[in-house]
Image (cartoon, rainbow, N blue to C red):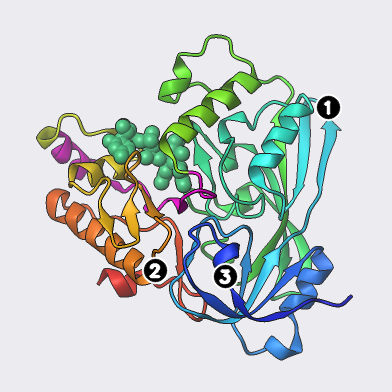
Amino acid sequence: MSLNIRKECCLIPYHSFRLPSTALALVEVHSAEEMAEAWHLEAFADSPKLVLGSGSNTVFVERFEGLVIVNRIMGREVLDEGSDWLVKLGAGEDWHDAVMWSLSQGISGLENLSLIPGTAGAAPVQNIGAYGMEFSDLCAYVDILDLEQGRFSRLSQDECCFGYRDSIFKGELKGRAVILGVGLRLPKQWSPRLNYGPLKELSEPSAQAIAERVMSVRREKLPDPDVLGNAGSFFKNPVVPNAVGKDLQQRHPNMPAYPAGEGQMKLAAGWLIEQSGMKGAKLDGVGVHQDQALVLVNHGEGTVEQLLALATQVVRRVSERFGVVLEPEVRLLNRQGEQCWSHYAD
Ligand code: EPU
């Protein structure tokens, strides 16, 4: 095996925001063995390392002073497990292509998660979710390389500790495991998930019809990263105690809010940003998207500095108007590959 390591690598093609940034080195790996080899390269023993899928949720705030390992482990397979289909995907598979492929095989169940940018291996990290479904609803297992034990292992759905845009890969296993592949359990007795607004109007739809509606809703509201650089929702929808949410609802009767587990409510960050007057705002080369305020975009000439300035302004405006502090959903990484938002938020 010989890995092709590229030094002083421009990261623009490796993340969907396409902001100017560089890394000390970058390597693409195509198998679990290559992943292990890249992780243990002598030349980078003391350097930070970062695994990237398609970079659809990542912003490099500073030059990355280490080795970026791009996960290109491919593979799609379906196993017949009696009452369920087990869909196995390599971590480097494009998520949306895999959804389309499973539907073309006559397998239903992934349709609500159509057109989500990113790779299959990134899906469990932030527990991707949209239109009434989350990755965790379908997850059978996640295969990992355990970096401390130096061995491959399999985590069950329970062991992944999924939450809203959260998982063990953002917590206990952060920096300690690399995702190699995922297994999805899809019952053959399929029933459509139609609880999200625009899907409710569909009557007796096929999985394909749901996928098409989801894609058209997404295309209407969300910018295509190939056309306008972005990383999807820039902020998480804030989860607040019921008392805070109810107080806000009294003052703003049109404010959307959803139950979010015991004693808590989830607010719509897009609504809060829009009501703070920031929807469509521009700051030099970056902006708040005109159709979905939760998405920040690179108009082409944007820089990381401008993006951080805009994000800080959005947080400040929402906090001043509603007393709610938004947290980024994207990974904002410093030269060591660590999350560095708190540095800017203070
Ligand atoms: N809204 C506004 N103004 C806006 C945007 C939204 O008033 O500019 C209001 C909407 O009218 C609606 C509410 O906010 O009442 C929620 O909006 P929407 O249904 O569009 O969803 P969201 O909460 O903004 C979340 C996910 C999206 C996912 C959609 C659909 C997060 C952080 N985002 O957005 O996921 O596609 O629901 O399920 O949870 C992503 O994670 O990158 C992503 C795009």
Cα distance in 3D space between marks 2 and 3: 13 Å
| Secondary structure found at label 3 | loop
Magenta stretch: give its range.
Answer: 224-249
Of mark 1 and mark 3, the one earlier in the sequence is 3
On the image, numbered disc 1 is attached to which residue? 82
Give amino acid for label 2.
Thr
* Residue 193 x/y as whole percent: 54, 23
* Residue 67 x/y as whole percent: 64, 79
Determine whether 167 is above or below 204 in the image.
Answer: below
Determine whether 57 is above or below 338 in the image.
Answer: above
Please say whether residue 294 is visible from this viewpoint.
yes
On the image, numbered disc 2 is attached to which residue? 303
Looking at the image, the residue that sits furthest to the left is 251
Which mark, by number, is residue 11?
Answer: 3
Cα distance in 3D space between marks 1 and 3: 44 Å
In reply to whether residue 9 is colored magenta, the answer given is no
Q: Does the residue labelled 2 lie within 8 Å of ligand 1?
A: no
> Within the displayed image, which quadrant is ligand 1 positioned in?
top left
The front one of 275 and 264 is 275
Determine whether 97 is above or below 318 in the image.
Answer: above
